[in-house]
Image (tube, helix red, strand yellow):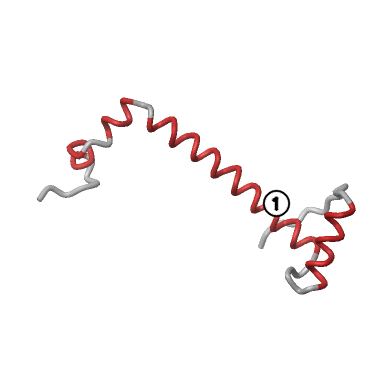
Amino acid sequence: MEKIVRTTLTLPAELVEAADRAVSQGKVKSRNEFVAQALRHELAALKRVEVDAALAEMAQDPEYQTELTLPALKRRGFLKSP
């Protein structure tokens, strides 16, 4: 089970009101759940940006590109020779 930490947030009133509407409409279970869900979503987006940046850097790396050649992949056992 996830460890839960109690914290206090200061948010714009319109965000709290919108979250409360989502709760009252049954779209989310609670304000806490909604905030946790939003944080997870944003943290995942940040992680995707990091991964995309790393992949873009790798795409420009000649040494990495050499390792992606068919013979190199076969040597490393990622592909079987016919």
Along the line of sight, the residue nearer the viewer: 50 or 77: 50
Image coordinates for residue 75, horizontal then vertical, percent: 19, 39
Amino acid under disc 1:
Leu
Task: State whether residue 61 is above or below residue 28.
Answer: above
Q: How many marks?
A: 1
Residue ID at (59%, 49%): 44
- Disc 1 crowd rating (10 Å Cα; few below 14, some 14-19, many 20+) is few
* Residue 42 as seen in the image, left or right of residue 65: right
Along the line of sight, the residue nearer the viewer: 1 or 54: 54
Residue ID at (69%, 58%): 37
* Residue 15 as seen in the image, left or right of residue 27: right
Task: State whether residue 32 is above or below residue 65.
Answer: below
Image coordinates for residue 45, horizontal then vertical, percent: 60, 47
* Residue 67 as seen in the image, left or right of residue 9: left
Q: Which residue is mark 1?
A: 39
Residue ID at (84%, 64%): 20
Task: State whether residue 1 is above or below residue 53.
Answer: below
